[in-house]
Structure formats: structure tokens, C-alpha cells
Image (tube, rainbow, N blue to C red):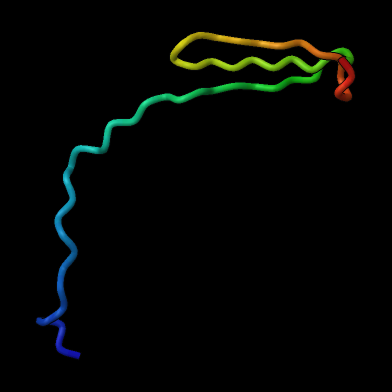
Amino acid sequence: MDRRHLRMPAAQSSTPPERRLIAVGTTRRCGGRTITVRATPVGVTGTIRLAGGAR
């Protein structure tokens, strides 16, 4: 195959696209409880529940 006729991909910008943090969170089980914490651009929320799904 003649490589002179293959198309080259378009050059990409050296600047990466803008990225935003949507949300970050963690779930932890400690002492029979499940602790969930979530942080978003709006604020931080959290819950503490009995482990095993009981409320």
C-alpha cells in the first residue's frame, strides 16, 4: 500500500477541554453504621444509617 495517499488525522489542540468536578463521595461502615458523605459544587451532604440497610 502506498502510504503517501493515507489521510493524517487532524491536529488536536494542545489545550485540554475544560473539566468540572460534578461530585465526589465516600461510603464507610463503622461500628454497625454506614456513613455516606457527598460533596458537590452546591454543598456537602451526608447520612448515617444502621448497617445492613435497616433504618
Residue 46 appears left or right of 4: right
Residue 22 percent across, percent down from the top left: 45, 25
Q: Which residue is drawn at 66% across and 11% down?
A: 46
Q: Is residue 44 above or below residue 29?
A: above
Residue 11 percent across, percent down from the top left: 14, 55
| Quadrant location of the N terminus in the rendered image | bottom left
Please identify the quarter of the rendering in which residue 35 is found.
top right
Q: Which residue is drawn at 16% across and 78% down?
A: 6
Please identify the quarter of the rendering in which residue 30 is found.
top right
Q: Which residue lies furthest to the bottom in this view?
A: 1
Q: How many labels does the image show?
A: 0
Residue 42 percent across, percent down from the top left: 46, 11
Please identify the quarter of the rendering in which residue 53 is found.
top right
| Quadrant location of the C terminus in the rendered image | top right
Q: Residue furthest front?
A: 55
Q: Residue at x 15, y 83 (%)?
A: 3
Q: Residue at x 64, y 15 (%)?
A: 37
Residue 50 appears left or right of 3: right
Q: In this view, does 24 lie above or below 10?
A: above
Q: Is residue 39 above or below residue 14?
A: above
Residue 26 appears left or right of 48: left
- Pick whichever, 39 or 54, lies toward us: 54
